[in-house]
Image (tube, rainbow, N blue to C red):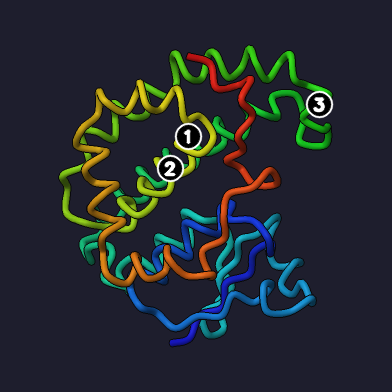
Amino acid sequence: MRYELHYWPGIQGRGEFVRLALEDAGAKYRDVWRESDRMSLQREAFAPPCLKAGRLVIPQTANILLFLGPRLGLAPKNEAARLRLHGQQLTIADWLAEVHDTHHPIASSLYYEDQKREAKRRSRIFLAERLPKFMRYFEREAEAKFSYVHLSLFQMIEGLRHAFPRAMRRTQRKYPRLIRLHDQVAARPRLARYLASERRLPFNQQGIFRHYPELDIR
């Protein structure tokens, strides 16, 4: 099957978690909104990403990965194990939302410059309390059988290193299994080719992972 991924062009965002699974599995897919100016399927979901698979239109990152996982060999066929992975992916979605809220703690409709004071306070709490809590949880899961969750953890570490390089240099030393997992994922042949290609968009100040030096509080 040839899949169609529908997500905002120009940013990695939530669509990148789906893209990593498709790339690692060598699946055939079109990155539709990057190939065309026409934003199709906008009425099919509250917000992108959406995946079109045959006649199915599947919204929400975790939901898409729940669907793709067993089809791409990135999840077991056992229902209980699949649901456990789904729960972990939903936890990653919570983590990602907290990263976003470090630079937009009041409202997404406001510019970062309109909420800098609140963002600095939010970032301080996130780095001191929430980041270690999420990393501590996934440190215990890092040596489980490889799945799409591991690809998503790779993306989280990549993004956090971009957004908070100073804080991550200090924090990541406490979680060696999670960092080793990141390095192993980066070395997977198909993924390594993707990461070195132009298809892998760089992080930027329009995406979820944004680097504001004043928020990178030690």
Q: Going 26% across and 64% down the picture, which residue do you hit?
A: 188
Which comes sooner in the sequence, label 1 or label 2? 1
- Looking at the picture, how far across and down is residue 36, in whole percent? 73, 79
Q: Going 25% across and 38% down the picture, which residue do you hit?
A: 178
- Looking at the picture, how far across and down is residue 59, in whole percent? 58, 62
Camera-side residue: 165 or 7?
165
Question: Seen in the image, is 19 located left or right of residue 84?
Answer: right
Identify whether 114 is placed above or below 18: above
Q: For mark 3, does the 10 Å Cα neighbourhood hold few (<14), some (14 to 19), or many (20 or more) residues?
A: few
Numbered mark located on residue 113 in the image: 3
Tell me the residue that label 2 is attached to: 156
Element under disc 3: helix
Which quadrant would the N terminus be assigned to in this image?
bottom left
The reply to whether the C-beta atoms of the residues labelled 3 and 1 are less than 8 Å apart is no
Tell me the residue that label 1 is attached to: 95
Name the amino acid type tagged 2.
Met
Q: For mark 1, does the 10 Å Cα neighbourhood hold few (<14), some (14 to 19), or many (20 or more) residues?
A: some
- State the image quarter where residue 72 is shown: bottom left
- State the image quarter where residue 142 is shown: top left
Q: Going 35% across and 43% down the picture, which residue do you hit?
A: 88
Report how far apart the C-alphas of labels 1 and 2 lie in the structure.
9 Å
Q: Going 48% across and 58% down the picture, which residue do you hit?
A: 63
